[in-house]
Image: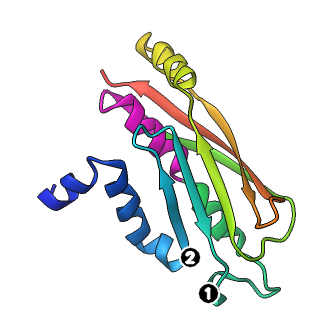
Amino acid sequence: MRKWIRRYISSASGIRRLLNWYRPYRGAAIKVTALSKDFTYARVEMRQRWYNSNYVGTHFGGSLYSMVDPMFMLLLMRQLGPEYIVWDKSAHIDFKRPGRGCVYAEFRLTPAQVDDIKKAADQGERVLPEWQVEVMDEHNKVVARVDKTLYVKKKS
């Protein structure tokens, strides 16, 4: 891996900057606005633009899902460390109302949740933790609800 990439992925601020330059995020006007140093919290926003709006003038559903897709996996991977395999297993998105303007989602992983996952994985089990995140609009109304399931296992 190139030195400059290694340097950036060693800190939360570097990962946040890389994600904000990541083409799929830039192409959908998605921005990671907060990522805590301990990887327990993240906030992602998406402003509405002509290129991320659909025929009826609301956010594309795929863009709404894209903004939340990698975040729980990223937070958990960074907290567990390289001794664990962490993958996205499944997701379900339930659209509640049309998304217009700036939308956002906030992600939180508590130390207790991470400890429970780690204990189960340390016993050789595959762990399938589930989280729910809501995509909110500027008026704090739910635009979409996303259920995410991850796959976690300790490396042999």
User: Mark on residue 86?
Assistant: none
Q: In this view, which residue lies farthest toward the top?
A: 123
Relative placement, left or right, of 64 versus 99 is left
Q: In this view, which residue lies farthest toward the right?
A: 97
Q: Position of residue 38 (x, y in %)?
A: 41, 37
Q: Is residue 47 magenta?
A: no
Residue 93 versus residue 3: which sits nearer the camera? 3
Q: Disc 1 residue type?
A: Tyr
Q: Quadrant of residue 13?
A: bottom left
What residue is shown with label 1?
51
Label 2, label 1: how far apart the Cα atoms are = 7 Å
Q: Is residue 2 visible?
A: no
Above or below, 123 against 99 in this view is above
Q: Which of disc 1 and disc 2 is earlier in sequence? A: 2
Above or below, 132 against 15 in this view is above
Circle 1 crowding by C-alpha within 10 Å: few under 14, some 14–19, many from 20:
few
* Stretch of the chain drawn in magenta: 70-86
Q: Disc 2 residue type?
A: Ala
Asked if disc 2 and disc 1 are in contact, CB closer than 8 Å, the reply is yes
Q: Quadrant of residue 20?
A: bottom left
Above or below, 55 against 123 in this view is below
Above or below, 54 against 150 in this view is below
Q: Position of residue 96 (x, y in %)?
A: 86, 59
What residue is shown with label 2?
28
- Secondary structure under tag 2 reads loop
Residue 122 versus residue 10: which sits nearer the camera? 10
* Quadrant position of the N terminus in the picture: bottom left
Circle 2 crowding by C-alpha within 10 Å: few under 14, some 14–19, many from 20:
many
Residue 128 versus residue 74: which sits nearer the camera? 74
